[in-house]
């Protein structure tokens, strides 16, 4: 395979530091998939909007993969909802750049809905097939989050257009395929279900007691790890309320997320500022100050020690299209308690690697944590199962191979719907 693939990931720069308000699972997905496709012999250019005028305009990061930064809009991180106002200019800039640079692509693969709008434009401009991965769906976010969802009114219409125009949609779990059919009337024959993967070299189990010691927790602590953005929909409030209900000082929580920090943990003066302030106020109100530690955002190569130290990793999201954190944790040998939503319903197998609970219910989460706390032998078995399960189901090498076969089918058949 020697095809040239154009990835459109407008707000998902594969090299962006994780932990910010808009840097998370999509950035990881784009970087890992493009890198593994490059290892298969494909050439992948990832088009992503600049977030600093100090960034290189073009930057390779693995064999066959590079990011090309789009100099449209202010050179800074902006709210995702603001990107819609720049879509026309972005859609114009990319093909102009491609002509100027003499670039030709065999296929475009877009990520997230406004990248999909640009992908539709490239498909029409060059007559090439379009593959799309949504990463989240507006209809489900609105139904789940209600007034907490700040997506623009145009989102649903754009997603409908993508469902009509894309030659193939990659759904990351069976629930997403059903949602696409139900809410968008997407043709199920155009939808291929392939999960996100995990970097099995980066995420490996470390000795638990040594990992606990390294991040300053005693071995007799029952440690809960949370890794992710400090976003309302991630359910951190539910986790904090569950800890308060348990009323057990031996249960400690380490929250890894937020702006990047080199400190091992944040002080309460650090937590007096956004995005931590609302959580610090709730912690103070609940009286659990001595049980909660924030670290700030950490690079991916440091996350394995937090996952490995955990007695259990909790993913309490209100809405989660896939839930990459859960499989990263399991790859490091941690059991997982997750909300019964989206992709988590299929990736976290109950009684094999973890447990599920109803979202927004601190009472149900507290019950699950108590079971894991009180039954260490059961939890030890789940932890032993976790890594082999992920190796079998979520290898990026295997998933990239499946996606490459989707590309091959579309390219060799000349399939590109008008």
Image (cartoon, rainbow, N blue to C red):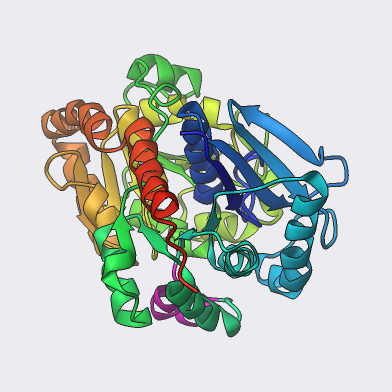
State the residue in front, 307 or 153.
Answer: 153
The N terminus lies in which quarter of the figure?
top left
Q: Main secondary structure of the magenta part?
A: helix
Q: What residue is shown at x 31% (from left), y 50% (from top)? A: 194
Residue 223: say if magenta.
no
> Position of 192 compared to 115: left or right?
left
Residue that lies at the very extreme toward the right in this rendered image: 53
Q: Up-down: is 161 above or below 231?
A: below
Q: Which residue corresponds to the image point at 39% horizontal and 64% vertical from the top-left?
A: 319
Q: Is residue 139 magenta?
A: yes
Q: Is residue 340 visible?
A: yes
Residue at 54 percent across and 58 percent down: it is: 110
| Residue 98 vertical position relative to residue 332 in the rendered view, above or below | below
* Depth order, front residue of 176/186: 186
304 over 338 or under it: above or below? above
Q: Which residues are magenta?
A: 137-149
Q: Quadrant of residue 81?
A: bottom right
- Name the residue at 44% across, 18% down: 213
Residue 259: percent from left, percent from top: 67, 45
Percent position (x, y) of residue 284? 54, 55
In depth, the one of 187 and 284 nearer the eye is 187
Q: Does 158 sit above or below residue 377?
A: below
């Amino acid at each position: 395979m020697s095809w040239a693939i154009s990835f459109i990931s407008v707000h998902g720069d594969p090299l962006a530091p994780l932990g910010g308000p808009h840097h998370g699972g999509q950035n990881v997905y784009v970087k890992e998939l493009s890198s593994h496709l490059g290892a298969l012999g494909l050439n992948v250019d990832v088009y992503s909007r600049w977030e600093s005028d100090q960034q290189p305009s073009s930057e390779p990061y693995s064999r066959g993969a590079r990011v090309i930064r789009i100099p449209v809009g202010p050179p800074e991180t902006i709210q995702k909802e603001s990107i819609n106002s720049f879509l026309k200019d972005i859609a114009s800039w990319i093909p102009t750049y491609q002509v100027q640079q003499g670039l030709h692509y065999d296929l475009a693969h877009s990520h997230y809905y406004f990248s999909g709008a640009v992908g539709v434009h490239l498909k029409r401009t060059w007559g090439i097939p379009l593959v799309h991965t949504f990463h989240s769906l507006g209809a489900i976010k609105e139904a789940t989050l209600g007034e907490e969802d700040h997506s623009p009114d145009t989102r649903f219409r754009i997603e409908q257009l993508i469902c009509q125009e894309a030659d193939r949609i990659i759904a990351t779990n069976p629930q997403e395929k059903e949602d696409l059919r139900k809410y968008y009337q997407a043709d199920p024959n155009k939808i291929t279900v392939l999960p996100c993967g995990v970097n099995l070299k980066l995420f490996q189990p470390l000795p638990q007691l040594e990992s606990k010691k390294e991040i300053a927790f005693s071995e007799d602590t029952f440690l809960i790890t949370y890794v992710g953005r400090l976003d309302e929909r991630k359910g951190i409030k539910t986790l904090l309320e569950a800890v308060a209900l348990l009323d057990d000082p031996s249960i400690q929580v380490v929250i890894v997320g937020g702006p990047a920090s080199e400190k091992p943990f944040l002080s309460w003066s650090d937590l007096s500022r956004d995005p931590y302030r609302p959580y610090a106020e709730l912690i103070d109100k609940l009286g659990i100050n001595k049980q909660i530690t924030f670290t700030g955002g950490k690079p991916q190569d440091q996350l394995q020690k937090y996952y490995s130290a955990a007695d259990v990793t909790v993913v309490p999201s209100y809405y989660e299209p896939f839930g990459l954190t859960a499989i990263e944790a399991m790859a490091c040998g941690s059991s997982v308690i997750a909300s019964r939503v989206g992709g988590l319903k299929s990736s976290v197998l109950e009684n094999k690697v973890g447990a599920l609970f109803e979202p927004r219910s601190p009472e149900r989460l507290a019950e699950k944590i108590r079971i894991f706390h009180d039954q260490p032998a059961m939890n030890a078995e789940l932890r032993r199962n976790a890594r082999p399960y992920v190796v079998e189901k979520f290898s990026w090498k295997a998933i990239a191979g499946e996606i490459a076969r989707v590309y091959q089918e579309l390219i060799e058949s000349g399939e590109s719907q008008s």
